Amino acid sequence: MHNPVAVIKNLLAKHKSTLLSSASLGVLLLLLKWMVLRYVIYNHSFEIYIGFIALLFTGLGIWLALKLSKPKIKTVVVQKEVYVPRDGSFVADAALIAQLQLSKRELEILGLMALGLSNEEIAASIFVSLSTVKTHNQNLFVKLDVKRRIQAVEKAKRLNIIP
Amino acid sequence: MHNPVAVIKNLLAKHKSTLLSSASLGVLLLLLKWMVLRYVIYNHSFEIYIGFIALLFTGLGIWLALKLSKPKIKTVVVQKEVYVPRDGSFVADAALIAQLQLSKRELEILGLMALGLSNEEIAASIFVSLSTVKTHNQNLFVKLDVKRRIQAVEKAKRLNIIP
DNA sequence: CTAAAACCCATACTTTGGTATTAAAAAAGG
DNA sequence: CCTTTTTTAATACCAAAGTATGGGTTTTAG
């Protein structure tokens, strides 16, 4: 017979009288405490009132703060590396292009160069004279700090200026 | 004269006397108010005390809340694209090179071309004559089916023949 | 408006690149 | 050994690329 409930029932039955007297004693003690408390309340009602007010308004303050305060935002910047395949989408490094002061036309010609077009073919494709293309080339080479068109193309590719 | 400060200065100068009398009247009124306030404080010191306590503990609550509240962490994930310039390891397409019948020397010259060297520079770097480089170039262009060195380089890169 | 860019074009000249052809060593492979 | 491929090389000529300079027209920004 190891059922705990049964064990307790057994104990209660055994010590019925002892328990009864203890219980009545306990009740008496509680009554006494209650009277003392009333006395205390009566004599210190002001302090208790103040304490209650304090507690209440502390709560109000907490509630207010929590309700109205902007949530502290902790911004965690996660750098996620995105591997961009060579063939995929290409985004030119606009900042670098601006820094090198490459003009729209120069960039256009650079791109056509990279396609393997000759100066004459470039001239034809953008409807300007060969001379103009050559002038653009000169400026381009100076800005990119290279000597030959092939170097310009390779450097531009390396710097993400052209695909 | 649209400067607001100047406009105000002008008005002050115009109505100096009026302003002075108004000011003194204002001061008198303030004094009266102050006396009334003292009376109120005398008669309602309890309520004021309570109010003060309330205010104080509201402040305490706010302070507590702000101090102890865990910051709401808002994680903002910023994807920063890092463009990886391509694998460090390059493996040439041996099969294609064999198929195109590109010789060792031709490949070497192709690589130097891609670096932006002139024919003369290539000749110097591999200790052969300019003529030799040109002959290699011719064969190279035929094998790669291109017309210009720049096209050769671009095509070779595209076909994974050179890095 | 005006100054600074960006753009366009030309001429003259030099250098580099590419084509064609020929040819001879050297290496590779059967 | 002999054949094929590779590598080297030369000459001559033409085409393309690049340099230097100067002068125009648009656009653009203060």
Image: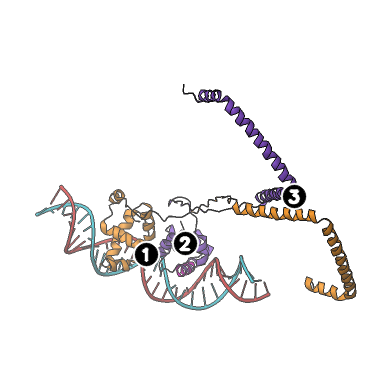
Chain colours: A purple, B orange, C red, D cyan
Earlier-in-chain disc, 2 versus 3: 3
Horizontal arrangement in the rendering, residue B40 relative to residue A47 (left or right): right
Is B39 positioned to the left or the right of A112 in the image?
Answer: right
Query: Image height check: is A15 above or below A65?
Result: above
Name the disc covering residue A74, or none: none
What's the magenta region?
Answer: A136-142
Q: Give the side of residue A156 with respect to residue B66, left or right.
A: left
- Residue located 82% across and 55% down the image: B44
Amino acid, disc 2? Leu
Question: Residue at horizontal 74%, vertical 47%?
Answer: A43
Residue B151 occupies which quadrant of the picture? bottom left
Dots 2, 3 in contact, CB < 8 A: no
Tell me, yes or no, if residue B3 can be seen here: no
**Same subunit: marks 1 and 3:** no
Residue B17 place in picture, x, y as percent: 90, 75
Residue A46's mark?
3
Query: Foreground mark, 1 or 3?
Result: 3
Q: Secondary structure at mark 1?
A: loop
Circle on res. B116: 1
Element at label 2: helix
Percent across and percent down for residue D19 are 43, 73
The residue at the point 74 percent across, 56 percent down is: B52
| Residue A110: numbered disc | 2
Majority secondary structure of the magenta segment? helix
Determine the chain carrying the residue at label 3: A
